[in-house]
Image (cartoon, grey):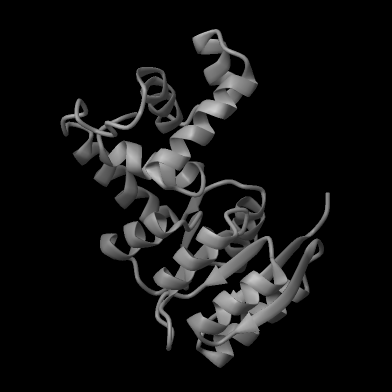
Amino acid sequence: MDGHRVLIADDHDEFRRGLEALLAATPDVEVVGTASDGAMAIALALDLQPDVVLMDLHMPRVNGIDATAQIVASSPHIGVLVLTMMEDEESVFAAMRAGARGYLLKGARRGEILRAVEAVGAGEVIFAPGVADRVMDYFLGVRNRPVADAFPDLTERERVVLGLIAEGKENGEIARQLGLSVKTVRNHASNIFAKLQVAHRAQAIVKAREAGLG
């Protein structure tokens, strides 16, 4: 497996240097650049095309939420891993809506950070334990919202596929359940993502669960 190419975006010099040292000492991880503000993070991400961007939320010029949104909109394959002091629900969901695939708090242990970089680089979604609890509580709260009028642009079949995506099922599992080919499910998923105006699966799951699916 090729190593993960990582860009670090944080305006605290000491913290950024510490992260850089940690990752540089890790096999299979290459730090390709560092940014001290959001505008620089966007420019470097689009130029260097890293696999993972470690993103602080509080940064000068452009904040981490807006930087995440611009990076993911231009390069959906880049995995943004938020690393921040902020654990309020508003920040967490703003980051996920912007397209972040992970959310860690700055008190995280070295091993947690490395595991999260690996996970996000592999296309997974990861939350700090405390943040994961908040996310689950939030989704349990929205599950009772009416679903009927959600996503009027979707066909009935797309709505069914989205519901299964929101349950965390992968394309192969959805294909078996609906008696379709994996290619057909993949096409449905692409159409769904386009109609929902999302860059990837994690964002689709957030939107679907907020509407009460899954």
Left or right: 209 in relation to 83: left
Q: Nearer the viewer, residue 91 or 203?
A: 203
Percent x, y for residue 214?
34, 29
Percent x, y for residue 110?
61, 68
Residue at 74%, 75% (x, y): give it. 32
Q: Which residue ends up furthest to the front in the rendered image?
A: 153
**84, above or below 147, in the image:** below
**Residue 62 picture quarter:** bottom left
Q: Nearer the viewer, residue 19 or 210?
A: 210
**Residue 71 picture quarter:** bottom right
Left or right: 207 in relation to 117: left
Residue at 40%, 55% (x, y): give it. 96
Q: Which residue ends up furthest to the top in the rendered image?
A: 179
Q: Nearer the viewer, residue 139 or 154?
A: 154
**30, above or below 43, in the image:** above
**36, above or below 98, in the image:** below
Residue at 16%, 34% (x, y): give it. 145
Percent x, y for residue 160?
39, 20
User: Is residue 105 something that shows in the picture?
Assistant: no
Q: Nearer the viewer, residue 62 or 29?
A: 62
Left or right: 202 in relation to 51: left
Residue at 64%, 77% (x, y): give it. 44
Percent x, y for residue 128?
45, 57
- How many numbered marks are there? 0
